[in-house]
Image: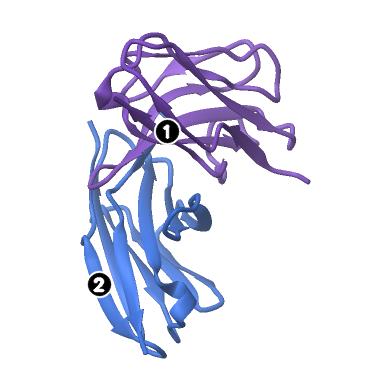
Chain colours: A blue, B purple
Amino acid sequence: GQNIDQPTEMTATEGAIVQINCTYQTSGFNGLFWYQQHAGEAPTFLSYNVLDGLEEKGRFSSFLSRSKGYSYLLLKELQMKDSASYLCAVLGGDYKLSFGAGTTVTVRA
Amino acid sequence: IAGITQAPTSQILAAGRRMTLRCTQDMRHNAMYWYRQDLGLGLRLIHYSNTAGTTGKGEVPDGYSVSRANTDDFPLTLASAVPSQTSVYFCASSAQRDHTDTQYFGPGTRLTVL
């Protein structure tokens, strides 16, 4: 089976930086996704990593270390609209996507 | 408008009743998926389809069935609903058959089984 761990909740101040960690133990690996989900809405795609290293996309960056089974999502210059749940998902060896329980980020003024 | 639609938006259902959740996409994506989302458990894959005419089981398939008669539609059926199937159900699609690209999610169906 798949085991994907991420913190349940994080709180940060507007304008600050927050790093959401995700560790995984999966049967095979074909990539790691991060999704954002606002309350009551559908998840939306943020990033995809399949090779080790950092992928930067505007205020959001995602890092992957396959040897450590570890990823993080970095949110810079936090805005109130960034308050949401952030879902780490791993594409396993069977090419099925397994999701972590999600990290709820609250941005305070 | 391109995207994925789901119906109904929400439904309250008596236990033992049959229910079909509808999902339609207009992006001509090959793969489609059904997930359920429960508090503290995250999204769990119920069934998937790599292409029209094929389906496969996900992590939690028991009590659910799907069909993929064409590219656009992927209905999910609960043959005899039970209270443990109370959840939010999301349909998703992706362009590639091997699931290696982004999944696009529908707005969800909130189902309550009493």
Residue A25 versus residue B32 in the image, above or below: below
Q: Amino acid at mark 1?
A: Tyr
Residue sitting at 45 percent across and 51 percent down? A50
The reply to whether residue A93 is visible in this rendering is: no
Mark 2 lies on a secondary structure that is strand
Q: Which sits in the foreground, A56 or B20?
A: B20
Q: Residues within 10 Å of mark 1 (few under 14, many from 20)?
A: many
Residue sitting at 23 percent across and 57 percent down? A6
Q: Residues within 10 Å of mark 2 (few under 14, many from 20)?
A: some
The reply to whether residue A75 is visible in this rendering is: yes
Q: Which sits in the foreground, A15 or A68?
A: A15
Disc 2: which residue: A10
Number of dots carrying numbers:
2
- The answer to which image quadrant residue A25 occupies is top left
> Where's residue B51, x and y in %?
63, 20
Asked if marks 2 and 1 touch (Cβ < 8 Å), the reply is no
Q: Amino acid at mark 2?
A: Met
Disc 1: which residue: B35
Residue sitting at 53 percent across and 39 percent down? B100
Q: Indicate the chain on which mark 2 is placed.
A: A
Residue sitting at 25 percent across and 72 percent down? A10
> Where's residue B44, x and y in %?
34, 34
